[in-house]
Image (cartoon, grey):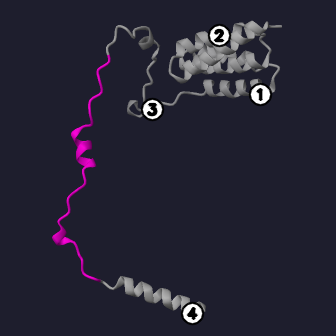
C-alpha cells in the first residue's frame, strides 16, 4: 500500500509530466511520469493511467521500443480500461510507417534545451506588422462618380409585393 505522501507526490509528478508532454518537453515528461509510476503500486488504476501517458511520452521522445514493451506489460493490467488502451496504443506503435514527402511534415522541436539554456539565448523583439498587412487593413478608396445612384424602384416593388401578400392573407 502506498503512503498518502507518496500518492500526493505521484499525482504532482503525473500532472507535471502531462503538462511537459503537452508543451513539447518530452524528456522532462518521461522523467516525471517514470518517477510518478515508481511511487505507486504497479497494478493500481492511477499507475495504469500514468503508464499509458508514459507510453505516449516514450513515443514522442523517440523511444518507440520502450513504449511497445510497456504496452505489452499493460495489456495484462487488472483494470480493463488500461489494458484496452494499451492494446490500442501498441497496435498504433507497431503500425508500419508511411513514406511522406518532407514538405508535408512539420517538425515539432524539443523545447527542453531552450528551458536549460534560457539565460544564454537572447530573444529578438517582435517586429510590427508588415507593410502588406498594413495595406490590407486600410480601406480601399472608391470613386463616387462611378457609383450607380439611379433609383431602380426596388423599394416600391417590394412594398407592393408585401401589400399584395398581406391583402391575400386577410
Q: CA distance from mark 2 to mark 3?
A: 32 Å
Q: Which residue is mark 3?
A: 100
Would you call the spot at circle 2 few (<14 residues within 10 Å), some (14-19), or many (20 or more)?
some
Q: Secondary structure at mark 1?
A: helix
**Label ID, residue 34:** 2
Q: Which residue is mark 4?
A: 168
**Label ID, residue 81:** 1
Please state which of the two labelled residues, at mark 1 or mark 4, is closer to the viewer. Answer: 4
Q: Secondary structure at mark 2?
A: helix
Q: Secondary structure at mark 3?
A: loop
The earlier-in-sequence mark between 1 and 3 is 1
Residue 168 vs 61, above or below: the answer is below
The earlier-in-sequence mark between 1 and 2 is 2
Please state which of the two labelled residues, at mark 1 or mark 3, is closer to the viewer. Answer: 1
Q: Which residues are magenta?
A: 123-151
Name the residue rendered at 43%, 84% in the picture.
Answer: 158
The percent coordinates of residue 64 (x first, y second) are 58, 17
Amino acid at each position: 500500500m502506498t503512503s498518502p505522501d507518496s500518492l500526493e507526490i505521484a499525482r504532482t509528478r503525473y500532472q507535471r509530466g502531462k503538462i511537459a508532454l503537452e508543451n513539447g518537453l518530452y524528456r522532462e515528461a518521461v522523467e516525471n511520469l517514470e518517477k510518478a509510476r515508481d511511487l505507486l503500486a504497479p497494478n493500481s488504476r492511477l499507475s495504469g493511467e500514468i503508464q499509458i501517458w508514459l507510453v505516449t511520452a516514450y513515443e514522442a521522445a523517440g523511444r518507440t521500443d520502450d513504449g511497445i514493451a510497456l504496452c505489452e506489460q499493460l495489456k495484462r493490467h487488472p483494470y480493463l480500461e488500461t489494458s484496452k488502451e494499451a492494446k490500442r496504443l501498441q497496435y498504433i506503435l507497431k503500425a508500419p510507417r508511411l513514406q511522406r514527402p518532407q514538405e508535408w511534415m512539420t517538425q515539432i522541436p524539443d523545447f527542453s534545451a531552450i528551458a536549460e539554456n534560457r539565460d544564454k539565448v537572447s530573444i529578438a523583439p517582435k517586429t510590427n506588422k508588415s507593410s502588406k498587412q498594413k495595406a490590407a487593413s486600410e480601406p480601399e478608396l472608391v470613386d463616387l462618380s462611378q457609383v450607380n445612384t439611379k433609383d431602380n424602384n426596388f423599394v416600391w416593388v417590394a412594398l407592393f409585393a408585401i401589400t399584395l401578400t398581406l391583402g391575400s392573407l386577410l
